[in-house]
Image (spheres, rainbow, N blue to C red):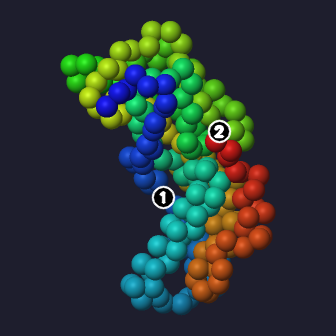
Amino acid sequence: MDVSSNEVRSREVLTVAPASEPIVASSAHAHLRLEGVTLSSTEDTLLDAYIQASREAAENYTDSVLINQTWELWLNRMPEIIKLGKAPINSVSNISYYDADNSSSIFSAGNYQLETLGQYGSQIRVFDNFPDVTTKREFPVVVTYVAGYGTAGTDCPEALNTSVRIMLTNLWEGEEVMTESVRFLLAPYRVFL
């Protein structure tokens, strides 16, 4: 494999899923008018799956992350500009790389800067001191970062939470999930990468 090519190839991997969902089960019960209704364990499991699926649909449509998650961006080389595939970005935990001896090292945080580009996501500008990543690894550079609006649904913009509730209702009732009203609510949060 020729890692000296100018083409930047990448793969993004979720390493730490959100610790919670933007809509908690009790709120979902109230929204679906299920208060006082005893659901079977199968129905409870289905409701939890629908909440997660609704969040994921919102995230996939917008390329935004609602609840904090940790991601790794694997790169075949160290470019000058690293485009991050999710938004909003809370922090860059580190940039690590493998050298010719297949030893992992951390790239000094003083050698790069996170730049937020609004609806165009975020990027990392790498300054001087590019490390040598001549190796047989397909992706010798790993950027670890945390994306999301926060740790709870109350940290998310209300339009995103409302879209999740509408999609949850549509799933529960067997209707079309991604309606025009859902797309309208999600549109301002789309990230154009």
The mark found on residue 121 in the picture is 2
Amino acid on which disc 2 is placed: Gly
Contact flag, marks 1 and 2 (Cβ < 8 Å): no
Residue 98 vs 83, above or below: the answer is above
Where residue 108 appears, as percent x and y from the top left, is 42, 15
* Residue 140 located left or right of residue 193: left
Look at the numbered disc 2 and give the secondary structure of its residue. loop
Q: Image quarter for residue 1?
A: top left
Look at the numbered disc 1 and give the secondary structure of its residue. loop
Q: CA distance from mark 1 to mark 2?
A: 23 Å
Residue 5 vs 84, above or below: the answer is above
> Is residue 172 something that shows in the picture?
yes
Residue at image coords 48%, 58%: 20
Amino acid on which disc 1 is placed: Ser
Q: Which residue is mark 1?
A: 20
- Closer to us: 172 or 9: 9
Where residue 79 appears, as percent x and y from the top left, is 50, 23
Residue lying furthest left: 101
Residue at image coords 40%, 22%: 4
The mark found on residue 153 in the picture is none
Mark positioned earlier in the residue sequence (1 or 2):
1
Q: Residues within 10 Å of mark 1 (few under 14, many from 20)?
A: few
Q: Residues within 10 Å of mark 2 (few under 14, many from 20)?
A: many
Where residue 151 appears, as percent x and y from the top left, is 53, 49
- Closer to us: 29 or 54: 54
* Residue 135 located left or right of residue 68: left
